[in-house]
Amino acid sequence: MAIAYDGINYFPVGVNFMEENAMEVIEAKYGIKGSAIVLKLMCKIYKEGYYIRWDEEQCLIFANKAGREVQAEEVQGIIEILFTKGILDRNSYQENGILTSESIQKVWMEATKRRKRELSELPYLMVKPEKENGKADTPPALQEIQQPELFKKEKTCE
């Protein structure tokens, strides 16, 4: 029997990832290791599914695994910027002690839509699950799966 796996093996990263405002602020404050921490954090979230539990202990463990030159205070500072820029949902963290966002959940739901599961039973969902007939509760215009702001491509000048 197969073991249930909630995570996904990859997630989309836009080509202008490093030029996003949130990443520029993080890199200006923490250097290139700030960008690496964001990517490692997103990998951890998607590896687990669409959220991770987060507290002081988890932050310390994450910082240690990221490397001895990374301090827990830096990781928490980066997360604070991600809250401020809307990449992560501050309310989910304050109310449930988790790191997630609506856009992270949309990416996860799109990537796992063929899996057999009862979406209404999943904890901490911020997005509306699809009905049994495969149609979402929201109008079609709102069904578009959006990448987290951080990973969207910017339009180029022509």
Image (spheres, rainbow, N blue to C red):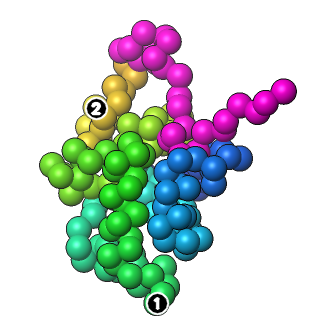
Q: Distance between the residues labelled 1 and 2?
A: 41 Å
Q: Which residue is drawn at 50% across and 12% down?
A: 141
Q: In which quarter of the image is the C terminus?
A: top right
**Is residue 118 found left or right of 57 in the rendered image?**
right
Coordinates of residue 22 in the picture (x, y in percent): 49, 51
Residue 80 located within the stretch drawn in magenta: no
Q: Nearer the viewer, mark 1 or mark 2?
A: 1
Based on the picture, tell me whether residue 142 belongs to the magenta stretch: yes
Residue 35 locus on image (x, y percent): 56, 64
Residue 149 visible to an observer of this rendering: yes
Amino acid on which disc 1 is placed: Arg
Q: Which mark is residue 112?
A: none
Indicate the amino acid at tag 2.
Answer: Ser
Q: Residue, x 38% and y 37% (percent of image)?
A: 102
43 over 90 or under it: above or below: below
Residue 111 versus residue 66 in the image, above or below: above
In the picture, the disc for residue 120 is 2
In the picture, measured across the screen, residue 73 lies left or right of residue 39, that is: left
Relative to the observer, which residue lies in front, 107 or 151?
151
Q: Name the residue under label 1.
A: 68
Work out whether 104 lies above or below 79: above
Of labels 1 and 2, earlier in sequence is: 1
> What secondary structure characterizes most of the magenta part?
loop
Give the residues in magenta: 134-158
Residue drawn at (49%, 61%) of the image: 26
Is the residue under label 2 in contact with that under label 1 (CB below 8 Å)?
no
Q: Can residue 4 be seen in this view?
A: no
Q: What element carries label 2?
A: helix
Label 2, residues with CA under 10 Å away: few <14, some 14-19, many ≥20: few
Q: Dot 1, crowdedness within 10 Å: few (<14), some or many (≥20)?
A: few
